Every structure is written in structure tokens, then in C-alpha cells.
Amino acid sequence: MGNPKGVERDFEQLERRRLKAARLFDRGLHQGEVARQLGVHRQSVSRWHQAWKKQGTKALVKATRAGRKPRLQPIELEQLGQGLKAGPEALGYGTALWTTWRVADLIERQTGQKFHPGHVWRILRSLGWSCQRPVGRATQRDEPAILQWKRVRWPEIKKKRSSKAEP
């Protein structure tokens, strides 16, 4: 159910439509006519009409917010972003790799709020962070030797295209 991915609801517009329906109910229009004029399903108009009959126009005013209130306040999210930029070494971890367990630990240390590591990615995404894997490279890697091999040795051993064209 709900909207297609990427399509957000305009709560103000939805409220205006419901309030317009209330004005049409006041004028004595039938539910079917209200549905036709507003271009909505009759089932929606029926729900609006029932609410309107019970509580009046105030029943059709939009709710204050949808969903659960966030556990982290905006200031806490800002502090979390700063902690993430400082790196996991600042917390005493041995590598510069953020894991969801480490981020959950950072959140708990900064705010006292416990988050399951499986849900931390949502917070990271809201802060503009994305999941990335570090490039695994050997510490004894010899970059000049690798570059030399790619430029000189590889072209020597690479298979050449045969001069005969295959049918």
C-alpha cells in the first residue's frame, strides 16, 4: 500500500481536499457527487463523511505527524555526524573502518540510546553516509613495480589477436 517509491504525499494538499469535501457535505451534496467532483474513491468520501458527521470539519484536519517520533533529536544527529567524521580510532578501535556495531556503540556513548546494529544503517543514510567496503591492499605493496609490470611485462605476455579473420 502507500505511494510508489520516490513519490511523497503532500499533506497540505490532502487536507485541502478533505476540507473541500466538508464544504460540499455542508451544501448537501451526496457522497457520490463529492467523489466525482474531487476525483477520489467513494470509499474515501464515505470515511470522510462519517468522520465529518461525528466531529465536524475538525475531524478532517491533518494529523500533526505520521509515524513514531524519532528517538534521536536533530542536535544528537549533528553530534553523531561529528563523531563519525572523527573516526573509529577516536573511540579506541584499531582500524579506521566504521561497522554498524561500532556506530551503534558511538550512538550509545553519545546519547545513551541503544540501537540494534541492524537498524543503524537508517540513521547513517539520513546523515548522508553510504555503505562502502574498503579496498583491501597488502601493506607491502610495491606500486612502482606494479606499474612497471602493467606497462612492460603485461603487453609482452598478453594474447595477441590472430591476423586471420574467423568466419
Image: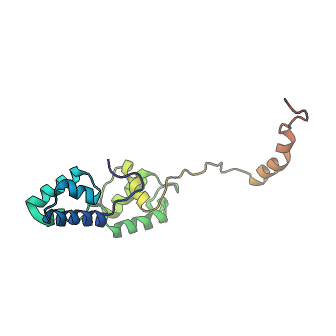
Instruction: Using the rendered image of the protein, determine whether residue 99 is visible from the camera's viewpoint.
Output: yes
Residue toward you, 34 or 9: 34
**Residue 44 falls left or right of residue 140:** left
Residue toward you, 133 or 70: 70
Q: Position of residue 130 (x, y in %)?
A: 49, 56
Q: How is the image coloured?
A: rainbow
Seen as rendered, the residue at the extreme bottom is 75
How many tags in the picture?
Answer: 0
162 to 73, vertically: above or below: above
Q: Residue at x 30, y 65 (%)?
A: 13
Q: Position of residue 94 (x, y in %)?
A: 50, 54
The image quadrant that residue 160 belongs to is top right
Q: Residue at x 13, y 60 (%)?
A: 52
Q: Position of residue 69 (x, y in %)?
A: 26, 60
> Which of the image's four quarters has the C terminus?
top right
The image quadrant that residue 163 belongs to is top right
The image quadrant that residue 103 belongs to is bottom left
Q: Residue at x 85, y 44 (%)?
A: 155
**Residue 102 falls left or right of residue 24:** right
Residue toward you, 164 or 126: 164
Q: Residue at x 12, y 55 (%)?
A: 50
**Residue 55 falls left or right of residue 110:** left
Seen as rendered, the residue at the extreme top is 167
Seen as rendered, the residue at the extreme left is 54
Q: Position of residue 7 (x, y in %)?
A: 40, 57
Instruction: Using the rendered image of the protein, determine whether residue 66 is visible from the camera's viewpoint.
Output: no
**Residue 134 falls left or right of residue 2:** right
